[in-house]
């Protein structure tokens, strides 16, 4: 049991991790075939992971409903919405679950008239939180906050027609800020994230990071 629970997952992570790295440095048609085969297996594993994630989500909301925790009504709505959408997906206007989705019908109606408006509403509400955070951030209490405030004002004015009306230099200054300082910071963040991802991957491949085995194995 210890081998199946601990040693075998470490061996699988090590072998497939090294294979996944090696195929990018082997200029051979066989390596390309291995990459294609691994991509198919990745889709299968992703499908199982999606199914497990769905079960975990439904189980989480079911526990909230059973225990009548705060906000359990939202969990009930989540369950009912999932069940209703699932039934309409299976029915598929009488064509069955494996037929292409109909352009019209209950499934598309739910998506167009429920999912899309809910998504638009959520992002509209998010705009108010962004504005509130920007107000708190742009208060010029320090020199760094002052620079951030000036840069933000220049970019905002340079991206709207009133900026070009006020001065011909504002659009050019806004574009320079986006192309030089902003792009440099963005690349630095991406490099840091990439190095962190590489370090995490190597820790998993060589068995240093074992949190995926369970809390007792980490």
Image (cartoon, helix red, strand yellow):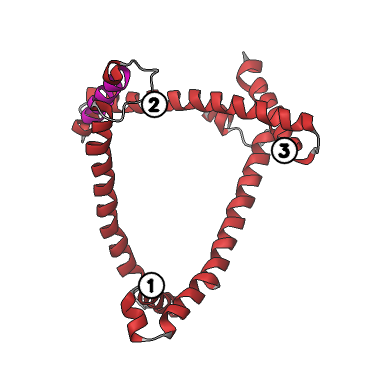
Q: Considering the image in quadrants, where does the C terminus appear? A: top right
Alpha carbons under labels 3 and 1: distance apart: 43 Å
Extreme residue toward the top, this view? 1
Q: Considering the image in quadrants, where does the N terminus appear? A: top right
Give neighbour class at mark 1: few <14, some 14-19, many 20+ (Cα, 10 Å): some
Mark earlier in primary sequence (3, 1): 3
Local SS, label 2: helix
Q: Which label number is shown at residue 159? A: 1
Relative height, residue 150 to residue 89 (above, below) = below
Give the left or right position of residue 214, taking residue 171 as reference.
right
Q: Are marks 3 and 1 in contact (CB under 8 Å)?
A: no
- For disc 2, the marked residue is 54
**Magenta: main secondary structure:** helix
Query: In the rendered structure, which segment of residues is drawn in magenta?
Result: 76-90
**Residue 81 on the magenta span:** yes
Which residue is drawn at the image coordinates 34% and 23% (left, top)?
Answer: 59
Alpha carbons under labels 2 and 1: distance apart: 42 Å
Q: Which label number is shown at residue 21? A: 3
């Amino acid at each position: 049991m210890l081998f199946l629970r601990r040693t075998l997952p470490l061996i699988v992570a090590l072998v497939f991790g090294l294979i996944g790295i090696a195929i990018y440095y082997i200029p051979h048609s066989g390596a390309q075939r291995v990459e294609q085969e691994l991509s198919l297996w990745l889709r299968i594993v992703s499908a199982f992971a999606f199914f497990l994630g769905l079960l975990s989500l439904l189980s989480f909301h079911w526990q909230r409903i059973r225990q009548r925790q705060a906000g359990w009504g939202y969990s009930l709505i989540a369950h009912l919405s999932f069940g209703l959408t699932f039934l309409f997906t299976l029915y598929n206007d009488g064509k069955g679950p494996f037929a292409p989705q109909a352009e019209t019908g209950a499934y598309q109606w739910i998506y167009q008239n429920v999912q899309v408006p809910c998504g638009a509403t959520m992002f509209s509400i998010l705009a108010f939180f962004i504005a509130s955070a920007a107000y708190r951030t742009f208060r010029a209490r320090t020199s760094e906050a002052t620079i951030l405030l000036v840069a933000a004002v220049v970019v905002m004015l340079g991206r709207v027609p009133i900026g070009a009306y006020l001065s011909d230099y504002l659009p050019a200054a806004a574009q320079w800020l986006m192309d030089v300082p902003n792009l440099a910071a963005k690349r630095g963040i991406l490099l840091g994230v990439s190095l962190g991802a590489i370090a995490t991957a190597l820790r998993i491949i060589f068995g240093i990071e074992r949190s995926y085995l369970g809390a007792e194995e980490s």
